Image: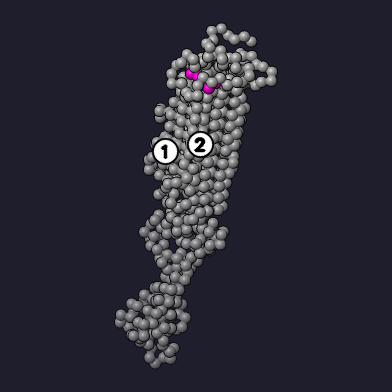
Amino acid sequence: MSEPPGLTPAERRVWHAFPTGAEIVFGDDRPTGPDPDRTVRAHVINQLLLGGGDTRDGFVAAVRVRGAYVIGRLNLTGGRVLHELDLSFCRIVEEPSFTNCRTGAIRLTDCKLPGMDAGGLRADGAVSLSRSEIDGGIRLPRAQLLGGFRMNETVITETDPETWAVFSGGMVVDGGFFARNATFEGGVRLVGARMNGGLFLEGTTVRNPGRLSLDGENIVVQDAAELSKGFRSEGTVRLRNARVNGTLSFDGSVLDSTDPGRLALHGSHMVVDELLMNLAEPIEGRLSLSFSRIDVLMDKPRIWPAEVYLDGLVYQSLRGPATPKDRLSWVSRDPQFHLQPYEQLASWYHGIGHDDVARKVQLAKLRARRRRLGPVARAWSILLDWTVGFGYRPWLAFAWFAALVAFGTVVFSADPPHPIKDNVEKPHYHALVYSLDLLIPLDSFGLQSSYDPVNWTRWVAYSLVASGWVLATALIAGVTRVLRPE
C-alpha cells in the first residue's frame, strides 16, 4: 500500500519503518514544544495500527517511535489492532482513546500526556505507562489487560477532587498490576478488580486527603497485594470485602487518613490468607477489620491507632512481638464494647496452651463490659471481680475467707462471747472454730448457736455472717459463669 499524500518527512519515516517494526528515534528526551522535525500527527499512527500500512513477511509490523511530538488524538476506539504501539519519550498533546479496543501490547513509557481513556480495552499484550507524566486521570472501567499493567514510577496528577487519578471498575489484570514507586495525586479506584497476577504498589504514594485514596472494595487478588516498602496513603484505603489469596502486606508503609475522624484503613469483611501489619509509622486515623477472616495476622503493637474496630474479626494465628498486655490493649480500643474480640483472643490463647492468659482475657472482657451496666449490676460486677474474679480466680474467695477467719479469731480471742445458757451442756469454745462457724452459712460446729457475742463484737459477728453468705453466693455465681458463659 502506498503512503498517503501529505506526509511530513518525520511522518514518512514512521510510515516506512512500520512494516519491519523498526524504532524511529527523533530524540532521547521528551520534546517541550512543537518541532517540525519531531512532530507526528496522531491520525498517521491511527492509520498504521488499524491496517492502513503495508506489512512485510518475516517481520512483525509495529509503530515504535522515540522522542516525537504527537499532535491530534490517538483514537483507536472500537478498533481491532493487530500491531504493537510503542511510544517512548514522546509528548502526546491530546488524550488518547482506546475505548472498547482489542489490541496487543501498548507502551507509552517515559511520555507526557493529558490523561487516557481505555474503558473496555482488551489488551492481549502488556500495557505500560511506566515513568510517564500524566496531567489528568486515566480511565479503565471493564478493561481486560491479559498481559499485565505497568505504571512503575509513573506520576499522575488529577487536580479535580471529584475525579479519580485512576478510575476502573471490574477490571481484570492477568499478568500483574505493577505500580512501584509511582505517585498518584488523586484517588485510585480498583473496585471489583481481579488481579490474577498480584497487586504491587511498593514505594508508591497515593494522595487524596479527606477522601478515598485507594478504593479496592470487592477486589480479588491472587498471589500477593504489596502495599509495602514505602507505600504511603494520604486518605482512606478501602479494602472492604476484598479477597487476597496470598499475602496482604503493609510492611514499611504509612497510612495517614489526614483526618482523625476518618478511617485510615477500612478492611472490614476481608478474607486474607496472611496480613502483615509492620508499618513504618503508627497509623494516623481509625482502622477497621470488622467481620474479616484472616488466617495469619502478623503485627507490631506500636502501629495500631487509638480506635480499632475488631468486632467479628476471626483469625487462626497471631504472630509478632506483642505481649498479652499488648493484645488486651488491642482488643480494648473499640469505642463500642463487643464480646467477640475478647472471646476470639481468649480462644486463640487457649488453643496454643496459654490457659492462664485466656483467663486474663476473659476477666478483661467482663471488666470492660462493666461500663455498660446500670448501678446495681455494676456493683454486683465489682463484687464478683473482687471476691472470686468472676469465677476465673476462685482462690480469691479462699484468700478473703482466710483473712476474715484470722480477723475473727483475733477479735473473739480478745473478747470471747458469752454462753447462751450456762447450765446446759455446750461444746467447748474455740475462737478459730467460732469464726469458722460464723462464716460458713450452715451452723457446722454448733458454736454459733451456743455462744452469743457481746458489746462491739456483735457487729463483727454480724459482718462475718454476712460476708460468709456473700462469699458463698459470689463463688457459686462465678463458677456458674465460667461453666455456662454468656
Residue 168: horizontal and vertical position, in percent? 52, 30
- Relative depth, front residue between 390 and 343: 343
Q: CA distance from mark 1 to mark 2?
A: 17 Å
Which residue is the extreme one toward the right? Answer: 57
Query: Does residue 108 show up?
Result: yes
Residue 476 image label: none
* Mark 1, secondary structure of its residue: strand
Range shown magenta: 65-69
User: Which is nearer the N-term, disc 1 or disc 2?
Assistant: 2
Q: Which residue is mark 1?
A: 234
Picture residue at 45% right of the left edge, 40% below the top: 232
Callout 2 crowding tier (Cα within 10 Å): few <14, some 14–19, many ≥20: many
Count residues near mark 1 (Cα–Cα under 10 Å), then give few for <14, some for 14-19, many for 20+. many
How many circles with numbers are drawn on the protein? 2
Percent of width and height locating residue 374: 38, 57
**Where residue 267 appears, x then y in whole percent?**
49, 43
Q: Quadrant of the N terminus?
A: top right
Q: Image quarter for residue 135?
A: top left
Instruction: Place residue 246 in its image quadrant.
Output: top right
Q: Name the amino acid, label 1.
A: Glu
251 or 166: nearer the viewer? 251
Visual colour scheme: one colour
Query: Who's the residue at 44% across and 43% down the image?
Result: 254
Q: Is residue 57 above or below residue 317?
A: above
- Left or right, 308 with reference to 199: left
Residue at 53%, 50% in the rendered image:
297
Q: Which residue is mark 2?
A: 180
Residue visible at 44% across and 88% down in the picture: 427
Element class at badge 2? loop
**Magenta span main SS:** strand
Q: Is residue 57 above or below residue 303?
A: above
